[in-house]
Image: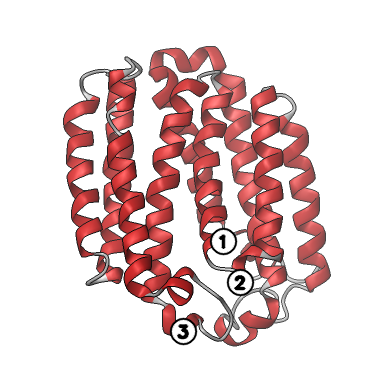
Amino acid sequence: MRAVGQGGVVGLFRVGNCLMAALGALLAAVVCVGLDGLSEFAIEVLLSMLVASLFTAAGNALNDYFDREVDKVAHPERPIPSGRVAPSTAFALSSLIFGAAFVLTLFVSVWSVTIFVIALVVMVGYERYLKAVGFAGNLAISWLTAALFLFGGAAVDRMDLAWILAALAFLATLGREIAKDVQDVEGDRASRRTLPMRIGIKNAGIVASASLIAAVALSPAPYLLDLLSIWYVPVVLAADAIFIYSALILMKNPEQGQKIVKLAMLVALLAFLLGGVL
């Protein structure tokens, strides 16, 4: 290994993303059992947070390994193109960390192991094949986002609520990913075959908007199924309004639309937290 530091080996992992993944797993667990129920699953939740962080670190290292040629132009400051980390080192570290994360997952739950294995297959498939395909890559990223919430729910044995939270995350992320492809359609022509290129910008915008509207349609389910308290309702209505607004402007302004989707996702997560804790 060469220089170790934020610009070296540690730079492969993108520590901020790892911390956000750990926080996401924790938030999903809190949503599913509330703060009072968290202590019963303290070990499982801590392990899930660690696994989510390690998975993210390994995935980022794998991303840098597969993107090493593209990054020579797009991100020359990253560890591999800058020469601070050898490609073989990045691949070996990614494999080692994925292995360590899998071993830790065995101590959480059967659901956690299943979710981990599927997420690993999707991650490798995305980096190796799906990234350049476009829509299949959008689906992969959306699943990986949703899987984080499933993983948090599996740690506290509350998959009933975790599935709904994950489905909402999947639909919202899918809409946002398609919107980003609409925004980047010209820049992507040389290396990717995205949905806007296949079916046209207008039709891709319609698909993105439909995905967001589907998330809105699903949003009442946690309250109607008596999984979350009444405190969920007013905040999720606000999130729904933001989702609908973003769906309406996606085709006219995809850049602004996908930013607003991100805001809607944050408000929706707050709704889940309030509904689960209060």
Find numbered disc 1 in the image and state the secondary structure of the residue it sits on: helix
Sooner in the amino-acid sequence: mark 1 or mark 3: 1
Tag of residue 132: 2
Tell me: 178 left or right of 278.
right
Find residue 76 and report its horizontal and vertical position in percent. 60, 83
Q: Which residue is painted at 35% across and 17% down in the image? A: 227
The residue pinned by badge 1 equals 137
Look at the numbered discs 2 and 1 and tell me whether their residues touch, using CB distance below 8 Å.
Answer: yes
Tell me: 83 left or right of 135.
right
Find residue 243 and report its horizontal and vertical position in percent. 24, 49
Residue type, label 1 = Gly
Sooner in the amino-acid sequence: mark 3 or mark 2: 2
Give the total number of marks visible in the rendering: 3
Find residue 28 and report its horizontal and vertical position in percent. 45, 31
Task: Please identify the quarter of the rendering in which residue 8 is found.
Answer: bottom right
Find numbered disc 3 in the image and state the secondary structure of the residue it sits on: helix
Crowdedness near tag 1: few (<14), some (14–19) or many (≥20) residues, C-alpha within 10 Å: many
202 or 4, which lies in front? 202
Q: Quadrant of the C terminus?
A: top left
